[in-house]
Image (spheres, rainbow, N blue to C red):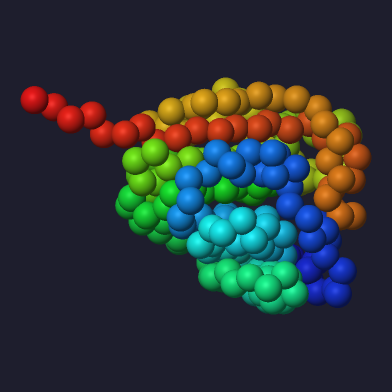
Amino acid sequence: MWNNRYATDAYIYGTEPNEFLRQQANKLPKGKILCLADGEGRNSVYLAQLGYEVTAVDASEVGLAKAQKLAATKGVSITTEVVDLADYDMGQNQWQGIVSIFCHLPPPLRKQVHGQINAALIAGGVFLLEAYTPAQLEHGTGGPPVAAMMMTATELAQELDGLQIDHCEELERDVVEGVGHSGTGAVVQLLGHKEEAHETE
């Protein structure tokens, strides 16, 4: 499905980064960043331009080929990996930051992926997410057509076990990101971090 969708010279979601990521990128510690379901690379390339060491994963080799092309035009390098998130191991204590922008998955898989986040971050590492909420179905301006694949603040707090949630808000905003996301959107935005280990006597 995604290979077919990305099989065009145009960038479906544009070449500019997600607005929430742009606003909050300074919260990500410098170092290694993992971008989940990064598609055509607009977010990973933006982070590489800021000096991060970025790995972008996605199920679509067509999307990631466009991500590499975008990186080349911007004069930066990113690592891309074609993966199925159902089988992907993020590792332990690997990443200074993990970014999930409109990564909509079936609920069992979403819980599996979110369940890895805290362990995969280094101490002090940051998780940044924006996704559509079920209220997005009323707008029809992007996202999956199924409410179960969208997210609420309450669900995220439950799924991100162990992560310290610093900010989590459901809101409506204008999402203007290519033809794929265009118009008023009902979103949830989240920032969280992995707590530093406390020394014991």
> Residue at 79% of width from left, 31% of height from top?
186
Q: Quadrant of residue 48?
A: bottom right
**In the displayed structure image, the side of residue 197 where residue 165 appears, left or right:** right
Q: Quadrant of residue 35?
A: bottom right
Residue sitting nearer the eye, 135 or 172: 172
Image height check: is 29 above or below 78? Answer: above
> Residue at 33% of width from left, 50% of height from top?
93
Image height check: is 1 above or below 95? Answer: below
Q: Quadrant of residue 61?
A: bottom right
From where the camera sits, is residue 12 visible?
A: yes
> Residue at 86% of width from left, 36% of height from top?
174
Percent of width and height locating residue 20 = 70, 39
Image height check: is 47 above or below 110? Answer: below
Percent of width and height locating residue 147 = 72, 36
Report how many numbered discs are placed on residues in the image.
Answer: 0
**In the displayed structure image, the side of residue 8 where residue 34 appears, left or right:** left
From where the camera sits, is residue 116 visible?
A: no
Percent of width and height locating residue 55 = 53, 63
**In the displayed structure image, the side of residue 14 where residue 82 appears, left or right:** left
Residue sitting nearer the eye, 158 or 183: 183
Farthest left residue in view? 201
Image height check: is 66 above or below 85? Answer: below
The quarter of the rendered structure image containing the C terminus is top left
Percent of width and height locating residue 121 = 40, 46
> Residue at 60% of width from left, 26% of height from top?
168
The quarter of the rendered structure image containing the N terminus is bottom right
